[in-house]
Amino acid sequence: DAKTTQPTSMDCAEGRAANLPCNHSTISGNEYVYWYRQIHSQGPQYIIHGLKNNETNEMASLIITEDRKSSTLILPHATLRDTAVYYCIVRPQGAQKLVFGQGTRLTINP
Amino acid sequence: GAGVSQTPSNKVTEKGKYVELRCDPISGHTALYWYRQSLGQGPEFLIYFQGTGAADDSGLPNDRFFAVRPEGSVSTLKIQRTERGDSAVYLCASSPGRTDTQYFGPGTRLTVL
């Protein structure tokens, strides 16, 4: 499975856009990029996923570079409730299990 | 609709005891997963069920760990002769099919004294 690299921690001001980077330079053509987040003492929450094209849903936007070696998760207007650990996961097509790394601890400051 | 539920939310046991952790997946989801999360780490895969059968149990750490899903819905993770190192949050997830998005429950925090 392709490995991902994320910053250990990030801070963002409430109301601003939070941009979380993820490097996956060894990604293969059939591997999806998934993002989950985990708020303290809760189970991981699915956010978004994509293969090649940028994706947007009610929670966030996912921007994948043309060479697919990196991606950015964008929370357009961060709130205090967005404080969590964010995991970027590369999942081969057809794979069942998710392989989590250490994630990025995002803190939204008032 | 109802999400994945797990019971109990917390379990404290003594070293050497047997424990069972229960997972109720989202209704209609055929795939079910167990993960374990140690403090400060990301979740680690344990086992995956497709229907009633364990399709991949490669993540189970040893033969003290066993899981069942007899009717293709509720699953039970069983740990025999618990050790202090088994202390962790045990997470369950389900998905409509084996390659679909996984939805997680709140987890069971197991503490072995």
Image: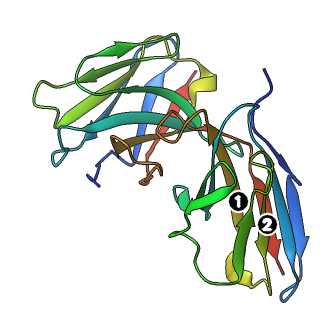
> The disc labelled 1 sits on which kind of residue?
Val
Badge 2 marks a residue whose secondary structure is: strand
Quadrant of image for the C terminus of chain B:
bottom right
Q: Position of residue B37 (x, y in %)?
A: 61, 60
Q: Please, what secondary structure does the residue beneath circle 1 have? A: strand
Identified by mark 2, the residue type is Leu
Badge 1 vs badge 2, beta-carbon distance below 8 Å: yes
Answer with the quarter of the image where residue A89 lies: top left
Q: Residue furthest left?
A: A67
Q: Nearer the viewer, residue B29 or A37?
A: B29
Please, is residue B19 above or below residue A38 in the view?
below
* Numbered mark located on residue B89 in the image: 1
The residue that appears at 16% across and 45% down in the rendered structure is A25
**Residue A52 lies in quadrant:** top left
User: Residue B110, which numbered label?
Assistant: 2
x 41%, y 54%: residue: A101
User: In the visual, does B24 lie left or right of B55?
Assistant: right
Residue plotted at (75% across, 38% down)? B4
Q: Give left or right: position of A96 versus B4.
A: left
Which chain letter matches label 2? B
Looking at the image, residue A48 sits to the left or right of residue B16; the answer is: left
Q: Earlier in the sequence, mark 1 or mark 2?
A: 1
* Res A52 visible: yes
